[in-house]
Amino acid sequence: MSEPARGSDRRRSGEGDRERTERAGLGDDVEVIVVSNRQPYRHRWGDDGIEVDRPTGGLTAGLDDVVRRIDGSWIAWGDGDADAEVVDDDDRVSVPPEASDGYPLRRVWLTGEQVDGYYYGFSNRVLWPVCHGTLSRVRSEGGYWDAYRSVNERFADAAADRADREDVIWLQDYHLGLVPQLLASRVPESVLVAHFWHIPWPDWDTFRACPHGAELLRGLVGNDLFVVHTERYRQHFFNCVEAALPRATVDRSAGRVFHRDGVTTVEAHPLGVDTERIPELSTDDGADERWRRLRAQYDIDEDVSVGVGVDRLDYTKGIPERIAAIERLLETRPEWQGEFTFVQIGSESRSRIPAYREVQTEVVEAVNRVNARFRTDDWRPVVYTTDRLADRELYTLYRNADLGVVSPVRDGMNLVAQEYVAAQADGDGVLVLSRQAGVHDLVGDDAVSITPQAPDEFAAALADALAMSDRERRVRMASLLDSCRAFDIDRWIDDVLGGVARLREDGGAGR
Ligand code: ADQ
């Protein structure tokens, strides 16, 4: 498999469409190198040889398209069992597979022990629960931190190997918190380092429970630009830096942290979805037929109202709370029995961690309980599947669902809420949304707001949403659509890359 020329070689040959880097003001001689734990494409052995799949998640799909358009490159953990079969001598493969205008994906290999300590350990048993404020779930075993550090070194080496001149290294998420600091001694000062943190940044009173918290913060202030979803997270980050790094100074009006090794600019840019592509797919020629098939597959009667939830099976997503609220709705408002079906799509996630296996069991038990209580011969209140839906099917389901129910107990942003809104080409769906999701800051009370841990209030909100007049549905949805379009994925990319470009104009890296 041949790899496309490195950015600068392409630039010399005049190839490539650098529209977005140029638009952001980065110039056409800059390569954006995305670095993330999860890769956009994975090669696996299937029945007929090597197959390619795409991990679940809106972010990798959105960024993949961008990296392609800007002739960037990507570095990520090669976690597919056939990944090593398709790379070249430098561990790179061109993706998307078969595309003539692909970009290089460099795979970083990790041992089972590293994955246990870095991914299932420090990232997902320490940082994830700390940042979501679920401190009782934090488990810090010996070896987690060392594995996190050594894997971060592997990623920093891979990024440094690729970056030169004025390139931009764009790190994604909490798995790579030490990479920025580690890059300082590995890349020239002219290379800019930016980092997007996809999960909440908690207040200091929560973050101070984080083992190695100060070291993590020192890692992150190695960035030239650190970006979170919301202003609240940004203020929390400043509070944590002030409390944990006594020698750092925060200038809130300038949005900067000054520290021993330089300056870090901190910005808030909410991540959005592709508000053009989603309605296109939810209304294309095959959409009606797809909806008929989905209804048959999930046994949804033609006349019932439909609600939908789509989540990774994570304890932060509030899925058992959602099912409990549906149970309360059917109990207290029996007129909805036989008239409302809720479709819950869940995708398995991090199952090696006990808390994740527990939530999977809890969801199945809750669904069985509600169905056993209320189902009739020709109606089932909750349909539950762990199928992975293709985009067209997912968006068709959203479009035809009367309610989109998003009820995390804590969530950095939540793309499902925005996907549901974007798919409402008919303008008449209702979004029921937890106040504890970052996206609530964006759309506010145009959604029907709920607190997931309050089942009576949640059930009453579901009833209100189901009974809402057509006029009110349309007014609210129009406003929700405006918010999601204003903060779509293109805006996010322009804002983050624009932030990098402003730093460059101001004199380059802060390190
Ligand atoms: P997540 O918590 O993984 O990521 P979330 O915002 O909930 O992300 O989005 C999940 C994505 O996976 C959505 O695009 C959804 O459509 C898709 N998905 C899930 N199950 C699916 C299935 N079975 N079939 C098809 N698609 C499925 C983190 C943070 C979030 C933040 C995102 C982006 O936790 O708060 O919004 O990053 O920054």
Image (spheres, rainbow, N blue to C red):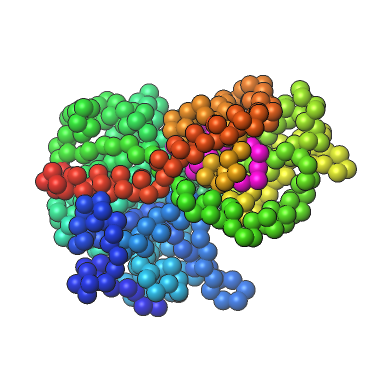
Q: How many marks?
A: 0
Residue 81, visible in the rendered structure: no
The x and y percentages for residue 504 are 16, 48
Seen at 47% across and 32% down, the residue is 443
Q: Residue lying at the far left in this picture: please name it.
A: 507
Is 185 left, or right, of 170 in this rendering? Answer: left
Seen at 60% across and 29% down, the residue is 472
Seen at 35% across and 62% down, the residue is 69
The x and y percentages for residue 180 are 26, 47
Identify the image quadrant of the C terminus. Answer: top left
Q: Is residue 415 magenta?
A: yes
Identify the image quadrant of the N terminus. Answer: bottom left
The x and y percentages for residue 483 are 44, 36
Is 194 left, or right, of 210 in this rendering? Answer: left
The x and y percentages for residue 41 are 46, 63
Specify the segment rendered in magenta: 399-418
355 or 270, nearer to the observer = 270
Q: Residue lying at the far right in this picture: please name it.
A: 377
Q: Quadrant of residue 35?
A: bottom left
Is 502 left, or right, of 156 in this rendering? Answer: left
Seen at 37% across and 33% down, the residue is 230
Residue 189, visible in the rendered structure: yes
